[in-house]
């Protein structure tokens, strides 16, 4: 295709069917549906203001353009720094030392590849993943898919809100109870979410500030502890775990499950819409994909370093330590909460106990700085989680509510279960709940990975930007590996429950779950041209013509009335 033929030229094929089949002879953009309701004055989104992209002619790379595209990737990277990830990091260090750093590196690289697909979908189509799912799946699978993604968002949101509450409890020396911290977090999240009224770039700068706070807080702990750099590099680049057993294996699986989060793929595909990209111009779309990938790489590299800080601190200071060692140290330094650690056994830590242990070994300052970092992680991820909830609900259900109504609804969905947990659980006994929430989110991964791989591989949706064979194969392998790892995590968790009733319930739910995952895989394969699975030849002719039952609708079709 010649460079000068980049503008959209779309012609309807002679004798095209009424369902909107379109023949494209050159590069064409994909237009989102346009309806009068989108112009309602009461409807507002994160995209009210779009960031202008400067023109730098005849330049292969421009820092001005990179700066203009900087923002969505850093908001996306916050999900890699939420309290669930921080807890996974500190447990990895305490249980396996530096030996699992290579797993963290590999999981981050896999996450980057998946985020690349999400960003490309948003840039090329002008729609985020939930909106594309709304147009491509029949009603029943679409509703089930929405419910599954909402479950993942609720699980993540509970961890994030409770992470903030734990940080406030530590900072107040126990004066703010867990339920009080939850209410404070929910309230200030409402306030912070409306910062984009003062400009999109100001909101992105606020998120950048929170990431900086995390980097400084956890970086301080890293410098204070002074980890062995040789062991750190060996653990990061040598994919081996000498002397590891079931505990370390489960922890490695937990790292992958904590890093790759389903709702983050939906979020990133929406955030990239905030840039003013001419999607009718192939050169501009290609350029946007390039800069978004560079920005995402930088953002995830920074998030990886922050995660490494946490792993290294607990690997150096607490790997192989026993509860007796911690109790003795806490008593020497006069730090309260020594009763958190039973007198026997290897040290087990979570976000709360981790702060206490740091205070016992390295002083009160280490405890408070740790709590500040956790507060920044929880607050930032709670805000991005709320955005995820809004985008998912708007996209799947095609809602056009006022901004306040949407924020209130998405917040309320997570408020009530989180408050119940905060009221009936104390801050010292939340590890079991976190394990359950990690399993819940792990189970939802196929409901993001399969759709994003399907849609970014479909020429009808992505045109010239559809995944090539290499990306399709790599995407399938990554999806299979990630899903298999997380299903192992689920099986390990369920078998640890030691209840016949729960086993039976889990078996029944597993059958339904696997059937729906199988449907999504079948839909994907048929959509991408695996003809042996296409049963149209065994259907009546009138029914076989209805491509929208199980094949991808051509995204050029405008489903709106005007």
Image (spheres, rainbow, N blue to C red):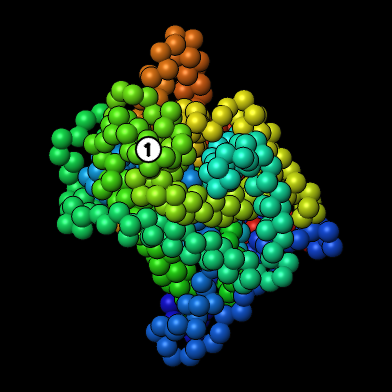
Residue occupying the point 46% across, 36% down: 336
Q: State whether residue 86 appears in this view.
A: no
Quarter of the picture containing the C terminus is bottom right
Which quadrant of the figure has residue 149? top right
Q: What crowding class fits label 1: few (fewer than 14 Cα within 10 Å), some (14-19), or many (20 or more)?
A: many
- In the image, residue 418 sits, relative to residue 232, either above or below, namely above
Task: Name the spot of residue 405 as percent of width and height, x first.
Answer: 79, 49
Residue occupying the point 53% across, 66% down: 208
Residue occupying the point 42% across, 40% down: 334
Which quadrant of the figure has residue 159? top right
Q: Which residue is mark 1?
A: 330
Task: Name the spot of residue 538 as percent of width and height, x first.
Answer: 50, 32
Task: Name the spot of residue 126 as percent of width and height, x first.
Answer: 60, 63
Please state which of residues 48 and 345 is positioned toward the viewer in this rendering.
Answer: 345
Task: Name the spot of residue 158 as percent of width and height, x first.
Answer: 58, 39
Q: Is residue 443 left or right of residue 404?
A: left
Q: Residue furthest left?
A: 242
Q: Residue furthest top?
A: 500
Residue occupying the point 41% across, 56% down: 218
């Amino acid at each position: 295709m010649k460079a000068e033929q980049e503008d959209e030229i779309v012609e309807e094929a002679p004798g095209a069917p009424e369902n909107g089949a379109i023949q494209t002879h050159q590069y064409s953009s994909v237009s989102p549906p346009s309806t009068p309701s989108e112009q309602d004055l009461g409807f507002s989104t994160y995209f009210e203001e779009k960031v202008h992209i400067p023109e730098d002619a005849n330049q292969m790379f421009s820092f001005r353009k990179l700066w203009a595209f900087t923002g969505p990737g850093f908001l996306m990277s916050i999900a890699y720094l939420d309290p669930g990830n921080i807890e996974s990091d500190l447990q990895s260090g305490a249980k396996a030392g530096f030996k699992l750093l290579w797993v963290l590196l590999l999981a981050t690289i896999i996450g980057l590849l998946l985020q690349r697909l999400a960003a490309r979908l948003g840039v090329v189509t002008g729609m985020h993943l939930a909106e594309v799912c709304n147009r491509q799946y029949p009603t029943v699978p679409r509703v089930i898919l929405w419910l599954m993604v909402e479950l993942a968002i609720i699980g993540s949101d509970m961890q994030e809100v409770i992470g903030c509450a734990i940080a406030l409890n530590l900072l107040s020396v126990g004066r703010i109870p867990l339920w009080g911290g939850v209410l404070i977090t929910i309230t200030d999240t409402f306030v912070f979410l409306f910062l984009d009224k003062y400009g999109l770039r100001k909101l992105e700068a606020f998120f950048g500030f929170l990431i900086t706070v995390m980097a400084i807080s956890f970086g301080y702990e890293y410098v204070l502890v002074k980890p062995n750099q040789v062991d750190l590099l060996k653990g990061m680049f040598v994919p081996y775990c000498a002397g590891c057993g079931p505990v370390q294996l489960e922890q490695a699986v937990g790292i992958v499950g904590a890093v790759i989060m389903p709702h983050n793929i939906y979020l990133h595909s929406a955030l990239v819409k905030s840039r003013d990209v001419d999607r009718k111009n192939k050169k501009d779309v290609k350029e946007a994909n390039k800069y978004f990938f560079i920005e995402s790489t930088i953002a995830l590299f920074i998030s990886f370093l922050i995660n490494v800080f946490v792993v290294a601190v607990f690997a150096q200071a607490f790997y192989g330590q026993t509860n007796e060692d911690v109790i003795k140290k806490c008593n020497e330094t006069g730090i309260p909460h020594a009763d958190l650690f039973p007198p026997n056994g290897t040290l087990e830590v979570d976000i709360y106990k981790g702060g206490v242990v740091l205070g016992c070994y390295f002083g009160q300052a280490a405890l408070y700085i740790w709590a500040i970092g956790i507060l920044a992680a929880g607050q930032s991820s709670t805000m991005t989680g709320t955005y995820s909830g809004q985008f998912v609900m708007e996209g799947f259900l095609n809602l056009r509510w006022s901004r306040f109504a949407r924020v209130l609804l998405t917040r309320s969905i997570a408020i009530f279960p989180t408050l119940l947990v905060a009221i009936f659980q104390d801050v010292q006994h939340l590890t079991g709940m976190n394990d359950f929430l990690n399993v819940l989110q792990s189970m939802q991964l196929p409901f993001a990975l399969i759709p994003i791989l399907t849609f970014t591989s479909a020429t009808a949706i992505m045109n010239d930007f559809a995944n090539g064979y290499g990306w399709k194969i790599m995407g399938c392998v990554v999806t299979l590996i990630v899903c298999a790892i997380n299903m192992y995590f689920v099986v390990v968790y369920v078998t640890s429950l030691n209840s016949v009733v729960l086993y039976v319930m889990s078996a029944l739910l597993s059958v339904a779950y696997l059937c729906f995952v199988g449907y999504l895989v079948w839909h994907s394969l048929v959509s991408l041209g695996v003809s042996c699975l296409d049963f149209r030849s065994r259907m009546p002719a009138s029914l076989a013509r209805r491509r929208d039952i199980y094949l991808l609708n051509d995204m050029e079709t405008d489903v709106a009335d005007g």
